[in-house]
Amino acid sequence: MSGLDKTLLVSSSPHVRKGRAVDRIMFEVMLALLPAVAWSLWSFGLGALFTLLTAIAASVLAEHLACRMVGRPSTVRDGSAMLTGLLFGLTLPPGLALWMVVVGAFIAIFLGKALFGGLGYNPFNPALVGRAVMQATFPVAMTTWVASTAPERFTRLPSTTLAWPLTQPVVDVVSGPTPLSAWKFSHQATDAADLFMGSTMGSAGETSALLILLGGVYLVGRKVMGWRIPVTILATVAVVSGALWLWDPTTYASPWFHLFSGGLMLGAVFMATDMVGSPMTHTGVVLYGILIGVLVVVIRTWAGMPEGVMYAILLGNALAPHLDRLIQPRVYGTTRKGKAP
């Protein structure tokens, strides 16, 4: 065959340099989450264990049912439903009633994923869709926190875990507000070291910033996740909150507090980096991260709720495709509108 008989294929980015199956990617992400999961189990015991197992099992079941309802083969083997369930469970209070966990997992899969056509077509992070609906539907239960490292955590479930639907359980293990709530409503600061290590109350997998960061470093090293989104989000939060703190440290929380508290680390590393819901262009990724970072600080500082990571990422997901369309690299030999000069 002569050189003239060969075909040169020219295509736009992204260019696939190395094939990697979906199930392998999901396995890598779940492996990176293991340190945070282990810390959750150590901190909250049986409450976290039952919450995470229920969220995973319900998500896998919902995925199987969703596929059968539309006449497609079940896709539970690709691991995406298991990862969605794990992420969803990590965002929940470890004493949440298990029937609520099941409801939220079904919402995450059916409303956040299957409704749009399944994996690869969902514009929003499914786990955050499930949590957002749960936050709006069960606000009291979603803000009821169990004590961290309680002596009886390995021998007794929280009383709220096995509560029946439409009942009012007797809460016997609540020890106070989360660090964000304490600052928001009482201006009570939490030590940065406790926030970084995870010695605080909160959702099942959001307390230890250190272990979440280690998981992110692993994913970047394995080339499963790009570093630009989490770094941009965290840098934006640090800059904006730092400027406010320098302006009035008695009114505004320090940048260390914002970085290590709440769900920022889990959201920036494992939620905002969703391949489907984030932009593809380098410039779009940076703007996406800046948008999320600014919204996190704005919601935490001036909104009525203490946490804003979930809503910031969902709004970023909504704008991601528009960022890609507005910031397209110019193809050589054409104008910005794709036309020949």
Image (cartoon, rainbow, N blue to C red):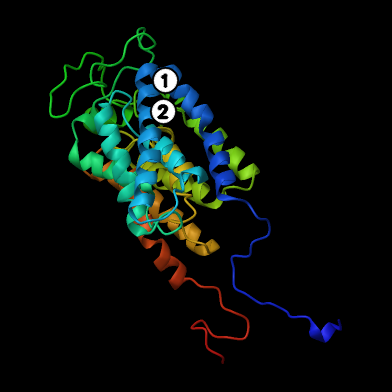
Q: Name the residue at 18% across, 24% down.
A: 164
Q: Quadrant of the N terminus?
A: bottom right
Horizontally, residue 338 falls left or right of residue 69, namely: right
Residue 167: x, y in percent? Answer: 13, 25
Front-lying residue, 300 or 212 = 212
Residue at image coords 46%, 57% = 120
Disc 1 element? loop
**Residue 141 in sight here:** yes
Tell me whether circle 2 and circle 1 mark residues in contact (CB < 8 Å): yes
Q: Check disc 2 and report its element: helix, strand or loop.
A: loop
User: Which one is in front, 33 or 114?
Assistant: 114
Residue at horizontal 29 percent and vertical 35 percent from the top: 102
Q: Quadrant of residue 28?
A: top right
- Viewport quadrant of the C terminus: bottom right
Q: Is residue 41 above or below residue 29?
A: above
Q: Label 2 neighbourhood size at 10 Å, few (<14), some (14-19), many (20+)?
A: many
Tag 1 or tag 2, which sits nearer the N-term? 1
Q: Quadrant of residue 87?
A: top left
Q: Measuring from the top left, give residue 44's x and y in whole percent.
A: 38, 19
Q: Residue furthest right?
A: 2
Classed neighbour count for the residue bearing mark 1: other residues with Cα under 10 Å, few (<14), some (14–19), many (≥20): some
Q: Amino acid at mark 1?
A: Ser
Q: Looking at numbered disc 2 in the image, what kind of residue is underneath it?
A: Thr
Residue beneath label 2, please?
Answer: 207
- The reply to whether residue 294 is in sight is no
- The residue lying furthest to the bottom in this view is 341
At which x and y percent is residue 243? 39, 45
Instruction: Tell me if 83 is positioned left or right of 151 in this view.
Output: right
Q: Residue at x 47, y 27 (%)?
A: 37
| Location of mark 1 (residue) | 199
